[in-house]
Image (cartoon, rainbow, N blue to C red):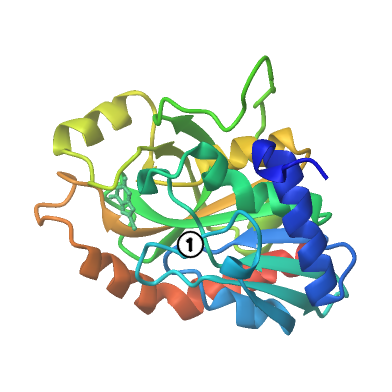
Amino acid sequence: MADPSANPFALAQEAAALIAERTGVERHDVALVLGSGWGEAADLIGETTATLQATELPGFSAPAVQGHVGTIRSILTSEGKRALVLGARTHFYEGKGVRAVVHGVRTAAAAGARTLVLTNGCGGLNPGWTPGTPVLISDHINLTAASPLEGATFVDLTDLYSSRLRDIARTVDPSLAEGVYAQFTGPHYETPAEVQYAKRIGADLVGMSTALEAIAGRHAGMEVFGISLVTNLAAGISPTPLSHQEVLEAGAAAGPRISRLLADIISKL
Ligand code: 8IG
């Protein structure tokens, strides 16, 4: 066989084949990437039928962030759907390249998933969004100066964050706020001036993930749903400086509530 590391799609196919073998599930229906604060949702979505270490699979590496888990779980929902939960996200700031960042998404697509649910913890620009507020992602601004696509791959990103899926989420919680997510490279947080810049170009949320994954998901033909947990007000919006500890605490405090919300949304997808 040709060397799959030369081709990101072949590498994803190889990882997906191993997922099918190890989980005994030939095709998964939906894939979830659980970011900061969202980890508990997996237990509420359904019954975990298999747990793999991401590092057992080709192309995956151990997660770099405290509060992120490096497991991949196959879950059977009460509606009989198969969910693949990726607890291991590779961030752009790890310097492993964009292919590594979107490998999980491409693997999920190769494992059959037609729906991609992306979650994250992020900074909020709306002072009314106190830490612990979940916000639907309506669109994104990719400030990484990178793309997961290579070559003349002209993919339309209109309605990238499916309005159909956002409507479904609002049937679960009509009060859900919605906003535009700007992906910065990180790992530093923004300066207050950068937050003001993000605001002027139309962002409501600032983070370090999701946009590149959403693009790869759309390219792979998946319907994308994104939801953020505002774990902190973005720099300069609040008078107090940001700390990763604060982020973890806000995520932990909001965990049970937003996990229930996400599980209820998944049950309707
Ligand atoms: I959690 O304020 C979390 N992730 N870029 N800015 C950026 N990423 C984040 C933030 C934030 N909070």
Q: Is residue 242 visible?
A: yes
Give the x, y percent position of residue 195. Answer: 24, 36
Secondary structure beneath dot 1 equals: loop
Q: In the shown orientation, is residue 124 left or right of residue 5? A: left
Please say if 185 is above or below 269.
Answer: above
What residue lies at 51% left-to-right and 57% top-to-bottom?
Answer: 89
Q: How many marks?
A: 1
Q: Nearer the viewer, residue 110 or 200?
A: 110
Tell me the quadrant of the picture where the C terminus can be found.
bottom right
Q: Nearer the viewer, residue 168 or 155?
A: 155
For label 1, count other residues whose C-alpha is less than 10 Å away and answer few (under 14), some (14-19) or many (20+): many
The quarter of the displayed image where residue 240 is located: bottom left
Q: Where is mark 1, residue-wise?
A: 35
Please say if 80 is above or below 61.
Answer: below
Residue behind label 1 places its C-beta within 8 angstroms of ligand 1: yes
Q: Nearer the viewer, residue 176 or 33?
A: 33
The quarter of the displayed image where residue 261 is located: bottom right
Q: In the shown orientation, is residue 265 left or right of residue 133? A: right
